[in-house]
Image (cartoon, rainbow, N blue to C red):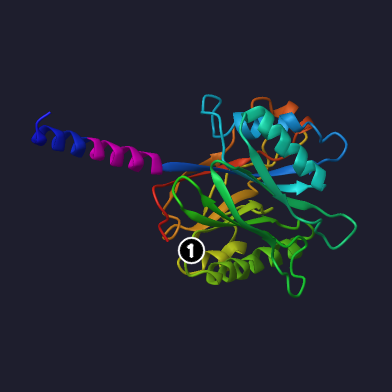
């Protein structure tokens, strides 16, 4: 082959390789938040049903593609419950998963746990801790989880939180206080500004109770305010589950919504009284 032709072939090969690497680095991080309704109690142990909902019904319609990368759970009652959901996810998805579960949290004999589940080929867990609740301001202080999207190197910090239901005054006080947690977590790192609050917040996202959070600078706003809790008549009742973040920092945001549920009564009576919500984040590199 003439030298000029060889050179052209080499340059073409390099260009194709760079293009392939660039395409490979562009990736979605598919995230779910879900109140799993006393996962582990009697009648709440259909682990395959939990896994099928997470893996097969992610996104708003029955025709949406299967698959998630990262899931946050509230109302996990035992450490063994998290282990069982993780094993079921591996079985249903065919991929390797790992998880972290918090200690039991609560002021009374009634306590819950938080859990995070992640695909090990897609997500690197950087840390998973529980907020140091100085002054005991929360019934269930949030779980703080930092992850890295392996395909792109993008880092995110998630605040996984189940607000007290209690009295109206108790709920309102916790909703106001979560703004201080958000600001503190945001200020902890100068390199990772992608902070996302998620969970079952027991309050509509448009309520004036959120003024302290939405008043944070840059502005914090919500994604997902669909009705997600399900009543005993198998109907959606309240908009309690949300994602909150600063759009100026979380530029990776692509889409969000309430997950599809195939059979509302079968779901309500055997799995959970909340629909999961999803958040898709798209990146090609760490933008912080």
Front in this rendered view, residue 74 or 103: 103
- Answer with left or right where residue 40 lies relative to residue 219: right
Q: Is residue 14 magenta?
A: yes
Q: Identify residue for label 1.
A: 193
Quarter of the picture containing the C terminus is: bottom left
Badge 1, how many Cα within 10 Å: few under 14, some, many 20+? Answer: many
Front in this rendered view, residue 275 or 111: 111
- Residue 276 is drawn in which quadrant? top right
Please state the horizontal and vertical placement of residue 258, each as a whole percent of the image: 58, 39
Please state the horizontal and vertical placement of residue 226, each as a whole percent of the image: 58, 43
Q: Residue at x 71, y 57 (%)?
A: 163
Front in this rendered view, residue 11 or 47: 11
Q: Is residue 250 magenta?
A: no
Could one spot residue 37 in this view of the protein?
no
Please state the horizontal and vertical placement of residue 159, each as a whole percent of the image: 62, 58
- Residue 137 is drawn in which quadrant? bottom right
- Answer with left or right where residue 35 lies relative to residue 93: right
Q: Residue at x 24, y 35 (%)?
A: 13
User: What's the magenta region?
Assistant: 13-25
């Amino acid at each position: 082959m003439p030298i000029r032709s060889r050179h052209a072939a080499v340059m073409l090969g390099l260009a194709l390789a760079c293009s392939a690497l660039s395409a490979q680095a562009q990736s979605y991080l598919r995230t779910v938040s879900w109140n799993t309704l006393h996962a582990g109690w009697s009648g709440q142990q259909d682990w395959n049903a939990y896994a099928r909902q997470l893996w097969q019904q992610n996104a708003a319609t029955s025709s949406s593609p299967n698959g998630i990368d990262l899931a946050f759970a509230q109302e996990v009652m035992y450490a063994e419950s998290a282990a069982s959901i993780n094993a079921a996810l591996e079985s249903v998805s065919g991929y390797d998963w790992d998880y972290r579960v918090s200690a039991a949290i609560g002021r009374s004999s009634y306590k819950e746990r938080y859990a995070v589940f992640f695909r090990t080929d897609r997500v690197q867990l950087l840390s998973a801790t529980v907020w140091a609740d100085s002054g005991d301001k929360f019934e269930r202080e949030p779980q703080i989880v930092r992850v890295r999207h392996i395909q792109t190197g993008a880092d995110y910090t998630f605040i996984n939180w189940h607000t007290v239901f209690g009295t109206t005054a108790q709920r309102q006080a916790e909703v106001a206080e979560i703004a201080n947690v958000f600001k503190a977590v945001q200020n902890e790192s100068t390199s990772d500004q992608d902070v996302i609050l998620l969970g079952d917040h027991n309050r509509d996202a448009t309520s004036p109770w959120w003024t302290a959070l939405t008043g944070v600078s840059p502005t914090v706003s919500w994604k997902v305010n669909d009705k997600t809790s399900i009543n005993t008549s198998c109907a959606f009742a309240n908009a309690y589950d949300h994602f909150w973040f600063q759009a100026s920092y979380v530029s990776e945001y692509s889409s969000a919504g309430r997950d599809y549920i195939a059979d509302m009564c079968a779901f309500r009576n055997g799995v959970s009284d909340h629909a999961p919500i999803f958040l898709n984040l798209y990146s090609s590199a760490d933008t912080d």
